[in-house]
Amino acid sequence: MSLESFRAETRSWLEGNCPESMRTPMILQEMPGGGKRAKYRNPETKLWLDRCAAMGFTAPTWPKEYGGAALSVEENLILRAEMARINARTPLVGMGLSMIGPALLEYGTEEQKTDHLPKITSGEIWWCQGYSEPNSGSDLASLQTKAVLDGDEYVINGQKVWTSGADNADWIFCLVRTDPDASKHNGITFILFSMDQPGISVKPIKLISGLSPFCETFFEDARASRKNIIGTVNEGWTVAKRLLQYERTMIGGIGGGNQRSTSLQEIAAEYIGLEEGKLADNSLRHKIIQHSMNDCCFGLAVRRNTEESKTTKAPSFVSSMFKLYGTEQNKFRYELMLEAMGSQMLGWEGEGFSAEELGQTRAWLRTKANSIEGGTSEIQLNIIAKRVLGLPD
């Protein structure tokens, strides 16, 4: 099929299958994360998810046998462009699609892929990440959560922290220490197991934004099957590093190349007003233009990297650059929004503020974590210096 024919068919399908309420800006309460405990405030969120999953559009570039659509890079770009044309919401989000799924495609056995990937693309399973520990944050390889072999299972004891979405997750991909005598980057194993079992408890951490997306997670004789080890026992650091690259690419994507600067212009016009068709505040107008230009350039850089990665289909150390720049771009966007909305974006509760304004306040506070999660900006700068630029230690 030619790209022109693919575009025509995709456009026709989207027009006929994307519900009208799914052609509006995403609402936090309607974020489609899936999972066994998912509750859909808007029934059309689930309808859109199911329709896209049936087409393989939740993971367009994944193989069809695992629930994807097997689209080429060019076809996937067309799909994204056609969805953007009608302002279609993303049908499914989460670590299953952006992190553990790609890692399984690269390192998983055929049994592991068949077992887990279709449940990701359908939205059946919500995943969380067991990496950081109270004493192992930036120095992740010093982690101490232990896994001891008992027959065909590992018995796991320890604690993780900043486990995003653990209170709603069905499964976890986790780093555990299986050889306490090995050097810290060795003796680590990457393993998957169910969160719905005795011995696992979760405590949400309340953030400055008022939300609790991060959690403390405790393991007391939790169990994981040997068949769910990804890669090799004691050599999980290799998988862990690759997954971090997928994570950083995903986090970097929140900051550019998706035309959100248009809504930023609209917000500024609403709160400040226009003079002769231009934003009344000259200084803010120039900042928004600069942000829009940076957004476009960043999007083009990401696209170029995608096209250059056709053969490997895996991220490289350049993911640290995307993570660094994308998160700073997203933070800058919300600072500009604050400058435009003024005190209307500083409300917490009570009269005088719309629900959208209160949501923007919390979203602005949430962005402060962008340059910390997934590896701080300082860590990304170190990686860029060593791995991208080749500078000496």
Image (cartoon, rainbow, N blue to C red):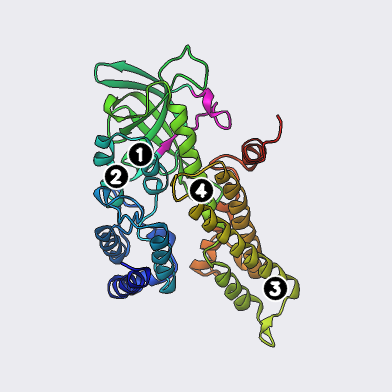
Please provide percent x and percent y for residue 53. Answer: 27, 57
Disc 1 + disc 4, Cβ < 8 Å:
no
Disc 2 + disc 3, Cβ < 8 Å:
no
Please provide percent x and percent y for residue 30. Answer: 38, 60
Please give left or right for residue 50 compared with residue 264 in the image.
left
* Vertical placement of residue 10 versus 312, above or below: below
**Mark 1 surroundings: few (<14), some (14-19) or many (≥20) residues within 10 A:** many
Mark 4 = which residue? 249
**Total marks placed:** 4
Q: Earlier in the sequence, mark 1 or mark 2?
A: 1
Mark 1 = which residue? 104
Residue found 26% across the figure and 36% down from its top: 110
SS for tag 1? helix
Please give left or right for residue 216 compared with residue 199 in the image.
right
Please provide percent x and percent y for residue 172. Answer: 36, 36
Give, as a three-letter code, the residue at label 3.
Arg
Mark 2 = which residue? 117
- Which circle marks residue 285 in the picture? 3
Please give left or right for residue 275 compared with residue 96 in the image.
right
Marks 3 and 1, how far apart at CA: 45 Å
